[in-house]
Amino acid sequence: MRVLKFGGSSLATPASIRAVGRILLDARRREPVIVVVSAFQGVTNQLLECARLAERGESSYEQTFEQIARRHRSAVAHLVRTRRVRVRAEVDALLTELQGTLQGIHLLRHCPVRALDMTASFGERLSALIIAAYLGHSHAAAFADARQFVVTDDQFTHANVIFGKTNRATRAYFARLFRRRPGVIPVVTGFVASTEDGQTTTIGRNGSDYSAAIVGAALGASVIEIWTDVDGVLSADPRAVSSAFVLPQISYEEAMELSYFGAKVLHSATIAPAVAKHIPILIKNTFNPAAPGTLISGRRGEGEGLAKGITSIGDLSLLTLGGASMVGVPGIAERLFRTLAARRVNVILISQASSEHTICFAVRSTDAAEAVEGIGQEFRFELHQQLMKLEEKSGQAILAVVGEGMKGRPGVAGKVFDALGRHNINISAIAQGASERNISCVINAAQQVHALNVIHQAFFETRTRLALAVIGVGNIGSALLRQLQQQRAYLLSKGFDVTVVGLADSKRFALASEGIDLTHWKETLAAARQRMTPGTFATRLAAMELPNVALVDCTANPSIVDAYPAFIDADLHIITPNKRANALPWRRYTALMELLERRQKYFLYEANVGAGLPVLSTLRDLIASGDEIVRIEGILSGTLSYLFNTFDGRVPFSALVREAHKLGYTEPDPRDDLSGQDVARKLLILARQIGLKMDLRDVRVDSLVPRALAGGAFSPRLLSAFARYDTEMTKRFKSAASRGAVLRYVGILENGRARAGLKEFPRAHPVASAKGSDNVIAFTTKRYSRTPLVVQGPGAGADVTAMGVFSDILKLLHYLPQ
């Protein structure tokens, strides 16, 4: 015999009830079945709301009652063909009884818990009656009121089952039923029961699962099936973790841990009767019956990972009782928990250090005031004498990692704490039982979803996921998006899942937690209605609560750099070709570096110097290997390299500047290049890399921008105005050529000093051999003293700069935990 339970979501509409009927009839062909049903979706909440309104004397309860009545009468009309008049009369009789109960509450302005249980019971009673009548069209079915065989105490709203009497009554009830009507499908009311003297009780919210287990255990069922609206028990709540997946098999112990700590698929007490009788429980999806579901049994699956699931409970308060007077004093814990038990406060987690100085414990927020009051009375002397103190931290959540595979495996707790720490999620308390099956920690409830995603990725995901938020979709940004689209399949094949979840230009931004389709990113951004401000963009990205996110700043905009702290606080790494952050004034620069270190975020900027060339990484490697930097010299501007490699005195210098701007070789404002400020920033970045305390004002710079054109905002007309100064540049070129030399704009870092300017070089010099937009950077070091180490290649252009950014994305993927 199989026991099948269907929850409210499976019984939401006549169409879903028909689907339930098909499942039951298919199951009945294989073996006898008993079905346990909940109320129609949402009805229990409506019933309780009716009782509350009636108790307050509000006549609006009648409107809610009428909604309930119409829904059930409509279900009869849609589902019941034969004996419809009789079934309608039975439903009306129950509705009349419900109405009388509510009228009594309204008249007395009082709803004792006994009346509340009676009111709540009508949902299952109506549901089971209608479903039994519907099944009767194609197979014999019978309404089975669980109050006739599930016996409880009188703890109304959460009554305790008296199993000895319940088991005997259940066996007797169904023996009589099956003798009288062989092959019948009993439709049992879940959730409801009765005391020994016949008073209606309920066994707690979600108690229909419990009802199914009670019946299945009493009758020795072969399996108990819980039919719901998901494909099984998932590795995490899919509403919080989009990558959650169905677990094919879990043990009883794992299921109990997961359900206790908030997994919503089944009621935690469901497990106990099944465990006692070794009855497997199968979780199935009413709306996808072909899915295999999750089997819960005494067996642990072979070859499975460390953890099975990540779950959480929110809306908690963490209370800490502490004081030196607790150390070595027997009975403190007994007094504390006896007090809480007397006030019916359920303690969800307990943690005590071996110093015995404090005991901290978590309770539901609704119980916190009662707990504080009780502790205040029990320990009034110690608290008054300041021998102890009681602290309350509200807005907390418990995160639990559950799995049989964690037993005896070193490093599991470290993996949890490392993952949370790297994402700046503080842990307030920790608990782990000797079974090692569960690691629980208390965190800020505001970080609950983020923490679930972080831990889920750490334990379950085979691919390293990285979400990117790209600001700036000009030449470099567009090239990067194209490269990301082209290389997506390659990255996936290497175990990296990189998605762009945010796009922004100067006016608007678009967000999509599942990733933006890069084949249509222009249309997506054009259709966006969110006005772009860096602070708003950072806030919205933080609200997505993704585990690994990086800001990719493809602008030269100082306002974006000013917002870097907001992005870092939003838990984003930063990747950028924008040099302004590394060229900030020293105090701001060091404050930014300290924030990155404190928040454990990566800051990657290979493209700051040399575009796609490995300039900074080469310099870091030299330093890390113990080499000493003596001198750095070279062409550091791809723009100026292009201009002076191309300039031959025949084409005006201003025309070459216009062409370089058009090709994307220059900064958005070409004066940043021609002024030498771009080279100065790069020298400053190199200087800071080798440990020099230097500011931009310390770099001596020879500007190529005429003083008359240096001020004001950039406009294309400025490019034309440069033509007035072509004669002077042509004169300098001819003067150098007359001596067999060429002009090159270079930066030099030596003896703690940095300077940038236009110099003449013999044609045989390595700097003179640069082509196109080449950068040429020569490192003279203690080891490379006679012949410098030279890095040379294109140092400007959208594609090569985007490649430098892409290389930083790859670095970050390898830095993230695998």
Image (cartoon, helix red, strand yellow):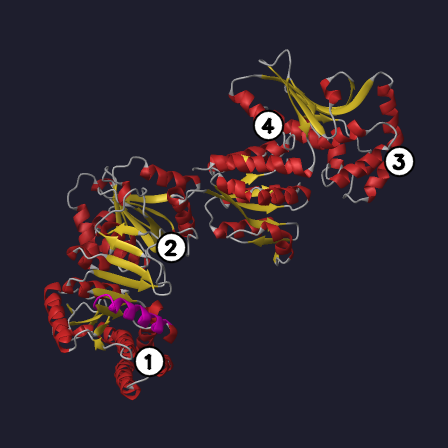
Q: Amino acid at mark 3?
A: Arg
Quarter of the figure with the C terminus: top left
* Residue that badge 4 annotates: 616
749 to 143, vertically: above or below: above
Q: CA distance from mark 3 to mark 2?
A: 68 Å
Q: Is residue 322 above or below residue 761?
A: below
Residue 119 x/y as whole percent = 26, 76
Q: Is residue 806 above or below residue 200?
A: above
The disc placed on residue 125 is none
- Mark positioned earlier in the residue sequence (1 or 4): 1
Label located before the other in sequence (3 or 1): 1
Q: Position of residue 521 (x, y in %)?
A: 61, 52
- The residue that label 1 is drawn on is 57
For mark 3, give the secondary structure: helix
Residue at mark 3? 724
- Give the label on residue 237, or none: 2
User: Percent from the top left, x then y, of residue 487?
Assistant: 57, 41
